[in-house]
Image (cartoon, rainbow, N blue to C red):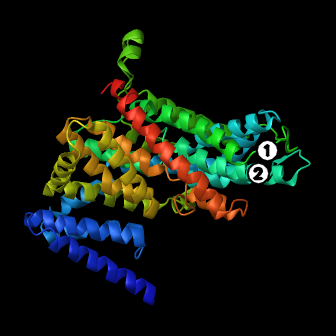
Amino acid sequence: MTFGKALKFVVVVVLALLAYFMTAPLESEMRVTFALLAMASALWITEALPLGVTALIIALAQPLLGIQPFRDALEPFFDPIIALFLGALFLAIAFEKQDLDEILAQRILERLGDNAKTLVLGMMFIAAFLAMWMTITATAALMIPLALRLTIEAKREKDKENFSKIMVLSMAYAASAGAIASLVGTPPNLIAAGLLQRIVGYNLTFVRWGLYGLPISIVLILLIWVLLFRFFPIEAKKVQKPKERFTSLNKKQKLTLAIFVLAVVLWVTRQLPDPIAAFIGWQGHGISESMVAIFIAVLLFLPGLLGQNDIAKIDWNTLLLFGGGLSLGSALEVSGLTDWIGLNLTNAVGTGSYITLFVILGFSTLVFTMIASNTACANILVPIAISVGLTTGISPAILAVFTAIVSTLDFMLPIGTPANAIAYSTGKVKMREMVKTGLLLDIVGVLVTIAFALTIWTLVPT
């Protein structure tokens, strides 16, 4: 064991002990749960152990600490939300294996025209759409190299440099913005849905999530587009487009695309909004999103679009992390700790000051997600947000979705998201440029989400 890793373990142990002894007035079960929360948070932030191993420790520790039986601690590891994410991962792997993602992206790219600003905006919406169904990392890994192939027709070298900065940052930021528009876009979305179902019995469907996330995604993409051209001005108007030409899709690519369309249709028609259901006389097919995801996963293997070797490509570490987060949320709920934290947060803010509550919760989440992964941030803060909602009378769904979305809006640092890291690794953007641009976008993103949470989201049917 290296000195650095040993030091991380010392920090983890010290934080867990401090958490236990500093909460002496609380009941014993709440104290050990708070210590478990501190330990898991420290392990996730320092990555002293693989994230999935920390998730297993969470399940193992609960019966040893007397929080809840081992069976109950393990149950969340194959929650329906886990099955949903598993199916979405298989679909993303099929897209990549059949080269369908790159072909579709490049074909759309050919049709966007050569106007620099229009092209960037079009590519941002492509990246955002892909991020709704693929991981942010995969989307950025696909779109950023495509973006770097494009150069601007300009005499000034500064124009070419600024256009390269715009292209790499716009793809990274659009991937993050697009991921919040879909239930399977990013892990925090699924964590929020899983915890809402587990804690309050609220079913957050694809359509409902879209009503929350899609408008924010669109607004953020437009704001990012405007701000990037402000930060990195260019005089040139036209872009030199690549000359590649592609043949028609082969049979496997067409079949993969058809299965993808089937998945989307089944996901969004499980339960139709009341006005649409009343108009067409059909409420929806009623099959859960998780069952659809597993069905799609099986369907991909039947015609050979995926094979046995592709199973190893699943990010099992992330799946374990999901389960650990849901298990931790269950422990916080069972012990009563989320209710206690929520009550104290409510008392500190004041039950009538909803704007202040959202500001504190939003910027606390933003700061936390800067130092931890967005998944770890959501695992820790979403249960608290739900508890605050139950205490204040604000919809727990609104607070959970709000926290999940903000945890994904980290544009400032290369370590914030894998997409940021990929953009920074191109060498086109300097650290101070990313920090300057990303900090403003972080603040704007939180404020935009707060505005939607306090207005438009209150109209979303529950």
Q: In the rendered view, does 398 fall on the left or right side of 263?
A: left
Q: Give me the residue at 54% from left, 53% from top.
A: 439
Q: Give me the residue at 17% from left, 51% from top.
A: 344
Q: In the rendered view, does 358 fall on the left or right side of 214?
A: left
How far apart in space, not on screen, are marks 1 and 2 (Cα)? 7 Å
**Most foreground residue, 246 or 333:** 333
Q: Mark number for residue 348? A: none
Residue type beneath disc 2: Asn
Q: Give me the residue at 58% from left, 58% from top.
A: 435
Q: Mark number for residue 234? A: 1
Q: Position of residue 290 (x, y in %)?
A: 38, 42
Q: In the rendered view, does 208 fall on the left or right side of 138?
A: left
**Crowdedness near tag 1: few (<14), some (14–19) or many (≥20) residues, C-alpha within 10 Å:** many
Q: Position of residue 395 (x, y in %)?
A: 26, 35
- Mark 1: which secondary structure? loop
Q: Give me the residue at 52% from left, 37% from top.
A: 217
**Crowdedness near tag 2: few (<14), some (14–19) or many (≥20) residues, C-alpha within 10 Å:** some
Q: Position of residue 271 (x, y in %)?
A: 37, 26
